[in-house]
Image (cartoon, rainbow, N blue to C red):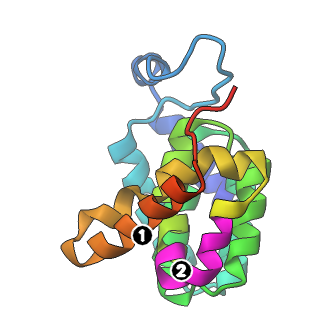
Amino acid sequence: MKILQELRKELKEKSSPEAKRAFRKFFKRNENIKSYGVKSGEVEKIAGKYYRKIKNLSKQEIFNLCEKLFSSKYMEEAFIASIWCQKLKNSFTKDDFNLFEKWIDKYIDNWAVCDGFCSRDISILIEKYPKVGSNFFYSTNESIYKNIPFIPVIIITQKERCKRFCKVIKMLAIHNYVVYRK
């Protein structure tokens, strides 16, 4: 789609070798990270700029664009996809769990993308549909299992959400959840 070509062109134009090197410091040497080298503040501005151009599309059309961004494996594109999804939070449904689970399994393969997507989007779904969301804690899917600890991060940020956060932590404790498995 033309919008993604424009977005990618702008990401390339805003990239810098210095930002790319600085970004690389957050990852292990053997991690295969694809990055344009655009600072996160600039990525957020670009996400907002292009979201204004697509905001009148249907939720499904925006989700299709997000999937294309996630599939590129570029960090900045994944961040933009997470930001765009979050802007659709009022239209999230229970069925979105299946799509998000697919994205986690297929595209989310490093801590930074996981942190952004899970703390922004998955946590909103779990807060909105706690019964369906609790299935994430029983998942045998390795990708989901590795990402579970990131989900409650944003939930703690507001006082009235504290009870739900504690409930999530208790669920982790009840199931003897271990963050790092060998």
Magenta-colored stretch includes residue 135? yes
* Element class at badge 2: helix
Q: Nearer the viewer, residue 65 or 137?
A: 137
Residue type pointed to by label 1: Lys
Count of picture labels: 2
Looking at the image, tell me whether mark 2 or mark 1 is earlier in sequence order: 2
Q: Nearer the viewer, mark 2 or mark 1?
A: 1
- Give the prevailing secondary structure in the magenta stretch: helix
User: Disc 2 and disc 1: Cα gap in Å?
Assistant: 10 Å
Q: Check disc 1 and report the residue beneath it.
A: 167
Looking at the picture, tell me which residue is in the foreground, 140 or 32. Answer: 140
Q: Which mark is residue 130?
A: 2
Quadrant housing residue 91: bottom right
Q: Check the image and name the residue furthest to the left.
A: 159
Residue at 69% across / 74% down in the picture? 97
Q: Can you give x and y, in whole percent of width and height, for residue 54 in the image?
A: 57, 76
Vertical comparison of 110 with 19: above or below: below
Which residue is found at the position 51% from the left and 49% from the top?
Answer: 149
Residue at x 49%, y 54% (from the top left corner): 173
Name the quadrant of the N terminus.
bottom right
Q: Are marks 2 and 1 in contact (CB under 8 Å)?
A: yes
Start and end of the magenta stretch? Answer: 126-136
Q: Residues within 10 Å of mark 1 (few under 14, many from 20)?
A: few
Looking at the picture, how far across and down is residue 152, in whole percent?
A: 43, 60
Q: Is residue 169 left or right of residue 132?
A: left
